[in-house]
Image: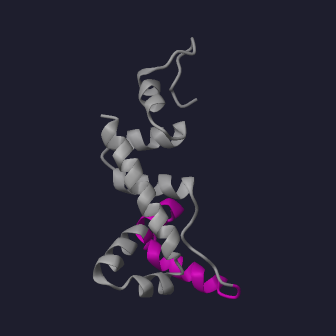
Amino acid sequence: MIGALDYHHDLTPLGVHLARLPLDPQIGKMILMAGLFRCADPITSTAAWISFKSPFYTPLGFEQTVDRVKRELSDRIRSDHLLTHKALRGFREARESGRLSEYCYRKFLSNSILTQLENMKKQFTDHLRLAR
């Protein structure tokens, strides 16, 4: 279904690249295609989020507040995938400016999950570089 095998169940050129990656084939294809289309940063964010979990948390009684914060952060983009990418970009900027705790608190984000997602993004980017 993802084009890794031909009708005889032999690896296609895409399948050869996917077989070299220590990743789920669907995630691997996402990352390879992101490299081809030069959009690795948002796609590796999405791949990390799909592979792990959302960095947002919702305290009891704050459901509407968290929804509002997500809408503000998304900047009218109706995509959870791109919302996570924006959250990760904000995470990097907040970390560099020394305002990480404030950023995570105000945006209802888990610092530890964002750190894990950033690490996964780096691993995915490294795999993409090695796949060339």
Task: Please identify the dominant SS of the magenta region.
Answer: helix
Q: Number of numbered discs present?
A: 0
* The magenta stretch spans residue 62: yes
Q: Say whether residue 88 is left or right of residue 52.
A: left
- Magenta-drawn segment: 60-87
**Residue pushed farthest top?**
8
Above or below for 24 versus 123: above
Residue at image point 59% right, 79% down: 67
Q: From the viewer's perspective, tell me whether residue 78 is left or right of residue 129.
A: right
> Residue 30 appears at what percent x and percent y?
45, 43
- Point out residue 121 in the picture as x, y percentages from the top left corner: 41, 56
* Residue at x 48%, y 29% (from the top left corner): 19
Q: Position of residue 61 (x, y in %)?
A: 70, 88
**How far from the left and from the top, in percent, is residue 20?**
43, 31
Coloring scheme used: one colour
* Up-down relation of residue 123 to residue 93 (above or below): above
Q: Report whether residue 77 is seen.
A: no
Residue for point 55% across, 82% down? 68
